[in-house]
């Protein structure tokens, strides 16, 4: 038998504590504030969040450190401190650190070497994270290996540069490898944040302009290295130059630089509506305009070291942005399926 309406009302009054069905504080039950218990946190979700945060921080730190070492290395050259430490890995025979007789040049060169050690340490941390979480980020591990090996190679090339007394060709190789490592680090950071198996998308015009830009960037970097090798900033007062006419090389360097600037303008015009491609294309154009402005000003002012240093750092930032712009033009091979969505098995 069902319960009577009177019985139901009686139960309601008993539960609310008043004959009119209201609560003891005079509010109707429907007006009572709803108190919910805090939801228990999923330990698996917490672990995945921590993993994602850690590897993202490491990837950004790797990219930032690879760019920063270009700045400190540039400071060594621009201040004439390339031979501030006369040997390697110690600074002076019998002394790992600079000695007072070396003055400020020894301190600058030694600080750059310490920075190189920090860059390698960050790259190793990134490699360990990539190994541990290779199932969640399968495309990151090969790139992390390249960054570590490249950073070690940079240290060895740096030793050769010192032993050969800053020959322009060895210094140029040193900088070129830095640009490559910045590009690889940018690619690695993209894979960490996006984590997608992808193929190239976009329109034919977008792909063609992106390809042209990607080809022109290394051309500009190489010609810039040759131009620097012909100029006054050798890294030490007695260091030989590459024999090229610096004034002629400045004009030669400007030709591919202006071509790259034109490509970047076209890239933004055809892709500004596409996200995130349009954002990276706009960033690339802004960097190139800034770089061109600094290049013109430094040439007219006799190559002041502050502007030359900024020019060097901006060049590798342009490399990184070009890589990110190209990757942002890619679309997932299988829409809605991401590599990062695959969870690692958890032991019971």
Image: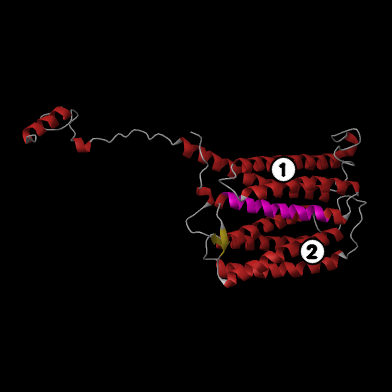
* Magenta-colored stretch includes residue 184: yes
Tell me where residue 14 appears, x and y as whole percent. Answer: 14, 27
Q: What is the chief secondary structure element of the magenta stretch?
A: helix
Is 329 left or right of 76, judged from the image as shown? left
The image quadrant that residue 107 belongs to is top right
Q: Residue furthest bottom?
A: 205
Quarter occupied by residue 112: top right
State whether residue 4 is above or below residue 297.
Answer: above
Which SS class for mark 2? Answer: helix
- Element type where label 1 sits in the image: helix
Confirm or deny contact between disc 2 and disc 1 (CB under 8 A): no
Q: Is residue 105 magenta?
A: no
Disc ID at residue 170: none
Cα–Cα span, label 2 and label 1 = 27 Å
Q: Residue at x 81, y 47 (%)?
A: 76
Residue 300, given in percent of the width and then of the height, sits at: 79, 63
- What span is in magenta? 172-192
- Image position of 333 (left or right of 183): left
The quarter of the rendered structure image containing the N terminus is top left
The residue that appears at 79% across and 41% down in the rendered structure is: 113
Which residue in the rendered view is the most extreme toward the front? 348
Which residue is more in the foreground, 201 or 182?
Answer: 201
> Residue 74: percent from the left, percent from the top?
78, 50
The residue that mark 2 highlights is 223
Above-or-below relation of 208 to 164: below
In the rendered structure, the answer to whether residue 140 lies left or right of residue 179 reads left
Along the line of sight, the residue nearer the viewer: 73 or 246? 73
2 or 1: mark nearer the eye: 1
């Amino acid at each position: 038998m069902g319960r009577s309406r009177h019985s139901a009302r009686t139960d309601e009054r008993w539960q609310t504590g008043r004959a009119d069905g209201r609560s003891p504080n005079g509010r109707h039950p429907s007006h009572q504030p709803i108190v919910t218990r805090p939801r228990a946190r999923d330990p698996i979700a917490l672990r995945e969040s921590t993993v994602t945060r850690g590897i993202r921080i490491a990837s950004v730190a790797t990219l930032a450190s690879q760019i920063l070492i270009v700045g400190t290395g540039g400071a060594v050259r621009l201040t004439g401190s390339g031979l501030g430490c006369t040997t390697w890995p110690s600074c002076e025979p019998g002394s790992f650190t600079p000695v007072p007789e070396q003055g400020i040049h020894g301190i600058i060169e030694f600080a750059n070497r310490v920075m190189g050690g920090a860059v390698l340490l960050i790259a190793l941390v990134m490699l360990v994270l990539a190994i541990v979480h290779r199932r969640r980020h399968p495309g990151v591990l090969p790139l992390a290996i390249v960054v570590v090996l490249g950073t070690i190679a940079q240290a060895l090339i740096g030793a050769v540069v010192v032993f050969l007394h800053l020959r322009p060709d060895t210094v140029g190789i040193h900088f070129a490898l830095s640009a490559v490592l910045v590009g690889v680090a940018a690619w690695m950071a993209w894979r960490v944040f996006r984590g997608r198996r992808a193929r190239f998308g976009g329109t034919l015009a977008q792909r063609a302009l992106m390809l042209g830009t990607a080809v022109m960037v290394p051309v500009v970097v190489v010609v810039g290295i040759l131009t620097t090798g012909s100029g006054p900033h050798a890294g030490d007062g007695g260091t030989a130059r590459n024999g090229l006419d610096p004034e002629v090389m400045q004009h030669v360097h400007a030709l591919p630089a202006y071509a790259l600037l034109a490509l970047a303008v076209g890239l933004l015009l055809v892709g500004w509506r596409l996200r995130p491609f349009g954002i990276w294309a706009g960033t690339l154009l802004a960097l190139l305009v800034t770089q061109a402005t600094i290049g013109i000003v430094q040439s007219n002012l006799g190559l002041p070291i502050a502007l030359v240093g900024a020019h060097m750092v901006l060049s590798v930032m342009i490399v990184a942005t070009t890589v990110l712009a190209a990757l942002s033009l890619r679309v997932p091979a299988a829409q809605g399926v991401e590599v990062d969505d695959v969870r690692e098995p958890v032991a019971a």
